[in-house]
Amino acid sequence: MSRARQAAGRGLGALALVALLAAGQHRAEAQARTAALVRGKIDQVLAVLRDPSLRGRARRAERHDRILAVANTIFDWDEFARRCLGATWRQIDAGQRQRFVGLFRQLLAGYYLEQMDNFAGDEKISVQGASGGGDQQVVKTLLVTRSRERMPIDYLLEKGPAGWRVVDVSVEQISLVNNYRSRFRSYLVNRSFEELLAHLSRVVGRRKSQP
């Protein structure tokens, strides 16, 4: 091989290395940003839970409103709903989709708020880091309860027009999306989609009527 070819080969190799390092740095920066985003939202929710003026059943509605205001800035409820419905999403019309998203959003938000009600306020949550690339990142966190139980909670974030949003949550490696998708699929084996909507409406109604 001529010296010119060897020099050209070294030059291409150096460019490839620079491109690889740049891509790795970009990915690391994106992971750091999503981890910081989740950390910030967790801190905002913990601040509400630890606020003495918001504790007790009498302040439950206000506490929920404040927590939900934070959750609305990080959760993509619509995408969450679409993923939970799976292949059935493609089989229903626009009106049914709209009704499902509305009901499921209330269902999922209700579940999230119920979990927040179980917090004593002295739990510790640490962000373990983020992984992934492109338009998807997984932020890993660890919840340590008052009884020192350690519970890993992973947030799947997807980048869209509104920025990074959570589209799935895994608690101890159990995905909420997969769990709901399995339940909906089983329900629809012998029932219509309209029956599913009616069922979700009843569940949401019961939760709303609880004191």
Image (tube, helix red, strand yellow):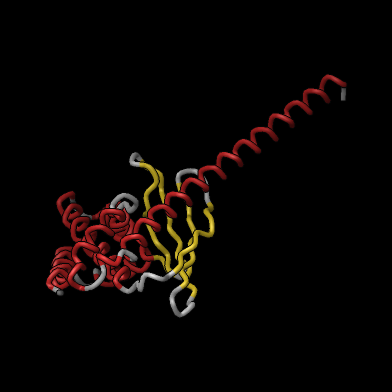
Q: Residue furthest front?
A: 53
Taking the image as shown, residue 137 lies to the left or right of residue 79, namely: right
Q: Is residue 150 above or below residue 53?
A: below
Q: Residue at x 26, y 62 (%)?
A: 109
Residue 198 rendering spot, x and y as whole percentages:
13, 67
Residue 163 rendering spot, x and y as whole percentages:
37, 42
Q: Quadrant of residue 206?
A: bottom left
Residue 195 rendering spot, x and y as whole percentages:
15, 68
Q: Residue at x 32, y 56 (%)?
A: 80
Q: Is residue 186 above or below residue 130?
A: below
Q: Residue at x 43, y 58 (%)?
A: 155
Q: Residue furthest bottom?
A: 147
Q: Residue furthest right?
A: 2
Residue 70 rendering spot, x and y as whole percentages:
30, 54
Q: Quadrant of residue 179?
A: bottom left
Q: Residue at x 46, y 67 (%)?
A: 124
Taking the image as shown, residue 163 lies to the left or right of residue 67, namely: right
Q: Is residue 9 above or below residue 188?
A: above
Q: Nearer the viewer, residue 11 or 114?
A: 114
Q: Is residue 192 visible?
A: no
Q: Is residue 137 visible?
A: yes
